[in-house]
Amino acid sequence: MRLTDCHNFHDFRRLAQKRLPQPIFNYIDGGADDEVTLRRNSTAFETCDLVPNILRGVDDVDLSVETMGVKLDLPVYLSPTALQRLFHHQGERATAAAAEKFGTMFGCSSLGTVSMEELAKKHKTPQVYQFYFHKDRGLNRAMMQKARESGIKVMMLTVDSITGGNRERDLRTGFSIPFRLSLKGMLQFAAKPAWGINYLTHEKFSLPQLDAHIDMKGDTVTIGRYFTEMLDPSMNWDDVAQMQEEWGGTFCLKGVMSAADARKAAEIGCKGIVLSNHGGRQLDGSRSGFDQLDEVIQHVGNDIDVMIDGGIQRGSHVLKALSLGAKAVGLGRFYLYALAAAGQPGIERALSQLKAELLRDMRLMGARKVSDLTRDNLRFR
């Protein structure tokens, strides 16, 4: 199977599975517990039907949107995700370059493998910094200051990961950073020698957002222990309000699900929220972002920019979210499989196909611009 054989989300997933060692593929692919929420993220869109309009003169279609004061050429952005250079040696460099080519936003994670400073210097496209809240308040301030010095304009605080989810696929293979694989996991790495050659012949793997503050190289801290021991489960609304004040710029919460929390975010001055269950990787059995979107929009849609992520596989999924009032839609696995399959060319092929789907579906919906999409275009089963 080659990149040219990839025509949709599932094709990229199959090619990624073919090229990655199973422990790494399962890290991307898996969710928490029984993975009920992971599956629901995509099936939620199947419970909603599109009602197209006709004869609307749709020769010219404008896909641009504005969210958190930033104009995007596409109504989708590349969500911040961790450990990208494990999936392909280009990592976030490929992600940022592809986002810039398509005129959209990308995110850099606290667990990113390329420094946010390097990416900000190289690319003009908007970058958000996805931040985890640590028990060490001095560490939080130092990391925010580094983001400010790097030119980051949007701070995206993840609020659904005050402790790590129970990701049983990782437990079975022993996947961790630094690597502490089970015998089965090591054999699966040995079965994909091309990945190993690429990993060893490129720059040494690192976590530059954390390396200056935390020893992630030795036996001190693994990714699992980072979530369970270093992140602060006591984080509350007062902490968020103080962090937002210290940041002093555009502030967004990622991982909001309830309408009450969305209202609180608006009241303390957040510019945006992302309805997200962390790709089904945290609380299994929770609702999907799309399931909650209508309720949240009804409560706060005029007061804060609402985005969603989770389960996006098709342009029609994006249109359904936009019709309910989402300002933009975050992509995660959608581009990570493409990254793992072929690096930057993979992401660009996936985005090109998604853009073509969006243009075609907008025309079929009778919509010339995103604001033409409304709840009237939807029916729920």
Image (tube, rainbow, N blue to C red):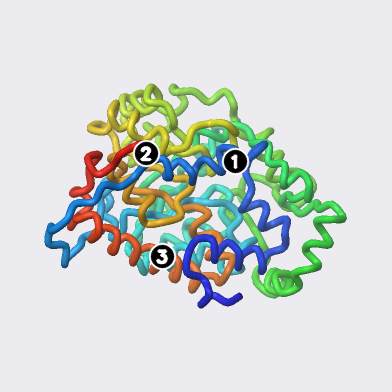
Element at label 3: helix
Task: Name which residue type carries label 1.
Answer: Arg
Q: Is residue 248 visible?
A: no
Residue for badge 3: 351
Q: Using the image as rendered, state which of residue 43 and residue 244 is in the foreground.
A: 43
Residue for badge 1: 281
Task: Name which residue type carries label 3.
Answer: Leu
When asked about the image quadrant of residue 122, the answer is bottom left
Q: Earlier in the sequence, mark 2 or mark 1?
A: 2
Element at label 1: loop
Query: What's the distance in space between the residues labelled 3 and 2, CA to CA?
Result: 27 Å
Label at residue 251: 2
Q: Is residue 172 left or right of residue 280?
A: right
Q: Quadrant of the C terminus?
A: top left
Q: Residue at x 54, y 59 (%)?
A: 336
Q: Residue at x 46, y 55 (%)?
A: 313
Q: Is residue 3 left or right of residue 215?
A: left
